Image (cartoon, helix red, strand yellow):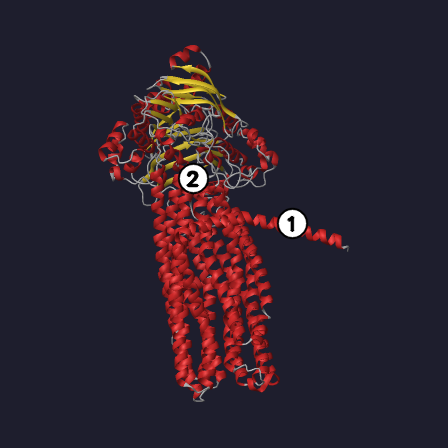
Amino acid sequence: MRTFWRLLGFLRPHRRGVAVSLALATVATGVGALIPYLVGRAVDDIRGGADQLWPLAALIVAAGLVRLVFSVVRRLVAGRVSLGVEYDLRNRMYSHLQSLELAFFDSQQTGQLMSRSTVDLQSVRFFLGYGLVFILQALVTLVVAATIMLAVNPLLAAVALAPLPLTVWFAFRYGKRNRPAQQEVQQRIAELTAEAEENVSGVRVVKAFAQEPRQLSRFGHRVGRVFSQAMVSTRIRAFYNPLLGFLPGLGLAALLLVGGRQAVEGQITIGDFVAFYGYVLMLAGPLRGLGVSLGMAQRAVASGTRVFELLDREPELTSPLGAPPLPAGGGRIELRGVAAAYAGAGPVLHDVDLVVEPGTTVAIVGATGSGKSTLVGLVPRLYDPVAGSVAIDGVDVRSVDLESLRGSVASVSDDAFLFSASVRENIAYARPDATAEEVEDAARRAGAHEFIAALPDGYETLIGERGLTVSGGQRQRIAIARALVRDARILILDDATSSVDPAKEAEIRAALEEPLRDRTALVIGHRLSTIQAADEVVVLDAGTIAARGDHGQLMEDSPLYREIVAAEGARATAPSARAPEAVGL
Amino acid sequence: MSSETRAARARRRMATAWRLLRGEDERARKLRGVLALLRPYRGRVVLMLVALVIATAAALAPPYLAGRAIDDGIRGGDLSALTVIVGLFFVAALVNWGATYVQTYLVNWVGQRALQDLRTRIFEHLQRLSIGFYSRNKAGVLISRLTNDVQALDQLVTDGVVTLFSSTLTLVGTAVILLYLDAGLALVTFLVFPLLLAGSVAFRIASAGAYRLTREKIALVTAYLQETLSGVRIVRAFGQERRHEHRFAELNDDYREVNMRTVRLNAAYFPSVELLSAVATAAILLYGASRVGGSGAVTIGILASFVFYLQTFFDPIQQLSQLYTTYQAGMAALDKVFELLDEEPDVVEHEAAGELPAVRGEITLEGVSFAYGGEDGEYALRDVDLVVPPGQTVALVGATGAGKSTLAKLVARFYDPTTGRVLVDGHDLREVAQRSLRSQLGVVPQEGFLFSGTIRDNIAFGREGAGDAEVRAAAAAVGAHEFIEQMPDGYDTDVGERGGRLSAGQRQLVAFARAAAADPRILILDEATSSVDVGTEARIEQGLRRLLAGRTALVIAHRLSTIRRAGRIIVLDGGRVVEQGTHDELIAAEGAYARQYRHWVEQAA
């Protein structure tokens, strides 16, 4: 219930619109409810001929016109409110997601977050936008029509209206039963899609092992499961849908029976009878809608709980209010007694002490899961340590403004994520005001200019999901250019050259030499050439620094380092750079 | 205007109409295709139509009965007649319920069955198509044919057909009853028809456009959200949250704006229909009043029936106008589905293709050239002659685009060579049944593609009915048994979608075991390039060695150890074999391989 009231809170900025649309709905419904009454009167006066009847006919048309005007305005106002609520809610959700720290996203599946921001948001907005209006309007219709009927003839009103509450109940139950059945259909369609997906992606394996018949029979099984569940849902629909039409029919039959007798006995006129008939028909739709809307409300509360769970999650990594920007400096990094951990998991890093002097390059090596990425993530404060401190140029990173801190650190992450935008926009990502020359210069330094210039639209070529697909090596070079365009004092390269072929890598390495010379750099690298070029190498093992020194020293002193180097040697670098789509069996 | 030009114009119009008709003819072929899907269930279709007619008739009875109740019962003061009519009324409502149940059930049964058949047919057809087809088409698009497009057809077949029949029947039925009750009043009622029809059609067309636009805009919003969630690391690292919020708000606003168009359209349409209903009621009352007193003999009951019919008369017209959207979406889906079904496989099974007998595993390529897209395309392989004796491991080496994987694909007969022949044990691959070739040939794709299911399912994939012992033996043979036993559920561990719950190295080992279980004479293997940890690396190397032992193998090699150990190295460049021999021979020859080898070694150490 608390969730329900909190959901209604989303309407607060639009309360005027809500009030106006409610008032308009009341007038429109009230005026509309006059029509059956007027028709009833007209039927009683029909013997007077057209001459006597035209004022009533004119009233009916006038009522219709008034209702038209009020309904049109009501729909426009309500529509604006509903879209406004949706707009606010979606923006709020997005801004909130943007305020949360990276560790939150590490612990959540993207699919889950997507489903909250789309599916759950949808059921909340459907209820706030449409469901609530339906409920209110149905109630207004019910009150107005029932009042008129009761005023005219209470007994007849009671008889005709008796089956109608059942409509609400059954419509509600219908939704409640049909929805899980429908969801199960969707679930099974999703399974079928996954099956199809797998067969299309794995078609080479299927063909290679000549397993077509077996895959077909598996697919046939999935198809059959969809069918049988679709029939479960169909049976529910086939039962309830006509039932919801039957109940008002029952009211009409009762009206015919009781009202007919009363009319014969002269207690009511034929006009009253016709008017009542009209009211029962008029109520059937809204009452059915009321049941549907109540189901909507129920779902909205369930979804709302999940939405609020997300909105109530406070951002845990923020800079103090009015924090000063990071003062200028040479880029000295200092980690003191640092420990890091993910929520609900053991420590990822512990007792890490590390000083990186301005302008030097430190390579970090270690097995998967040894804590390399977490360590470099501490510097731009993507994560906070659970113990110890991280300082840049003598200032604790937690005491300065986040935006200025992150503006001083440029990173290239291992997945080289690019946005669906032009190449230029991707490179200028961190500095949207960068000039064309600056963008091109960064691209040149990252060894990317050549292939970008050869793209169909050069720097304006759209890449990413909805644009051109670029190879892994090209992505990485664009990502490097993106980091270079931000003239930051600290550079973080996370495995930045892993999917670039050796020749290109040498070229990038040469290009990076100059920017690396006067910048502090942390490099996570697998390749020996990367490691050898560093001023110092730090070997991580299970979250602690196991050894440090230059390549030569470590080869002598550290067995772990030797093992890592040996493994790199055993696995020859791929003899060719691979464009993933062009090859592969 | 002269009569001649008028005649010419008429002729031109006729020609246009004819073209349109012929254009529809293609559609008609496809619609016949849909009807063909329904043919096996025609008995149920007929039953469904009968139920539909009964349900519609029962739904049309109440207003008429109410009118008779007024005339015969109330005005005649005949209570027993009233009771009978109420009884009929009740029966009509019950019949409507029952008949609607039957009709809904049957139409969905038939519709779902037909679509199930269609899905299976598309799937079967997809399986017949060659690998070349799959490289030309995006996976997402093909899957969409099986899911979204079939779904759109579902709408057309079930909702569309039912609406078409029931609304038309209701409309015609009501019109007939009204004409029967009183022709004059009926004609007055029909006056509002053209207006309603024109308005409805215009509304549907306009709102179809508006809804499409709304869907497009919301898709942009969702895609943007998805993208910034996937790239959240970059967003945080570069501190660009505020810019994304701003852009998101813009997209959100665009969506709100176009959605407002649908609100406006709805706000104009639905209240207008209500007004038309009020106007029609007033018109009937006025005209009716002028006829009640006179000799025209319009009774009050008939008048009441008209008023009651009017309340629901407009529904079928609204529903029919809605069909336009369903029809369009359905036809678009139909076009796509048929386009797929009309696609012919590139690799065609020879009519007289015989079974390939059990082979020793000798592979021969005679003057093989191959171009993707036929003779006019760019050649990926040129004049390749090659004989691989049974049991030899051949490492294919070369830069991207040198032709390594093309060569491997030709041996697996994923494609046929453009010129030349590929033979196994002297049998031209084009003359043997594809199944009999593939059952003796194993393929290990790069990164070891696995299917969802258990490890056991995956190992037994290539060998139907493989028992537990065989699965374990295969795993043990490539050194995968150890890690599998350590998994929580052992061989019954669920590998997840595409094997996602296993590490890259584990996937490789399972893929090796899968190939080992099939025990092929010939093995084609694309070595993985992904980095794995030290221990797994050693295990993979060992597994690979055991898998290759005793089989003829073509390996697209990426590891120096594999290349060094191969019985023969084939160096490809620009689609030609430029060097071949053992590692030592090639090093001694001081050619391209020797140069390249030195470079790799430098890179690696």
Using the image, name the chain to which the residue with label 2 belongs: B
Q: Position of residue B327 (x, y in %)?
A: 51, 54
Circle 2 SS class:
helix
Residue A84 in view, yes or no: yes
Determine contact: label 2, label 1, CB under 8 Å.
no
Q: Position of residue B559 (x, y in %)?
A: 38, 23
Q: Quadrant of the C terminus of chain B?
A: top left
> Is label 1 in a helix, a strand or a loop?
helix
Eye-nearest disc, 2 or 1: 1
What residue is at 42 percent from the left and 66 percent from the top?
B55
Task: Work out whether residue A365 or residue A250 is closer to the camera in this orientation and state it.
Answer: A250
The CA span between labels 2 and 1 is: 39 Å
* Chain for numbered disc 1: B
Instruction: Give the position of the N terminus of chain B as an image quadrant.
Output: bottom right
Which residue in the protein does label 2 denote?
A: B126
Which disc is residue B15 wearing? 1
Q: In the rendered image, which quarter is residue B413 located in?
A: top left
Q: Quadrant of residue B44?
A: bottom left
- Residue at 47 percent across and 40 percent down: it is B234
User: Residue B30 versus residue B598: which sits nearer the camera?
Assistant: B30
Q: Position of residue B95 (x, y in %)?
A: 39, 69
Residue found 68% across the figure and 50% down from its top: B12
Q: Residue furthest left?
A: B469
Rendering coords of residue A315 (x, y %): 42, 50
Residue type (three-letter) at the residue carrying disc 2:
Leu
Q: Is residue B296 above or below residue A466?
A: below
Q: In the image shown, does B331 or B382 lie closer to the viewer? A: B331
Residue sticking out furthest to the right: B2
Q: For the residue carrying disc 2, how many other residues have a C-alpha within 10 Å: few (<14), some (14-19), or many (20+)? A: many
Tag 1: amino acid: Ala
Is residue A180 something that shows in the picture? no
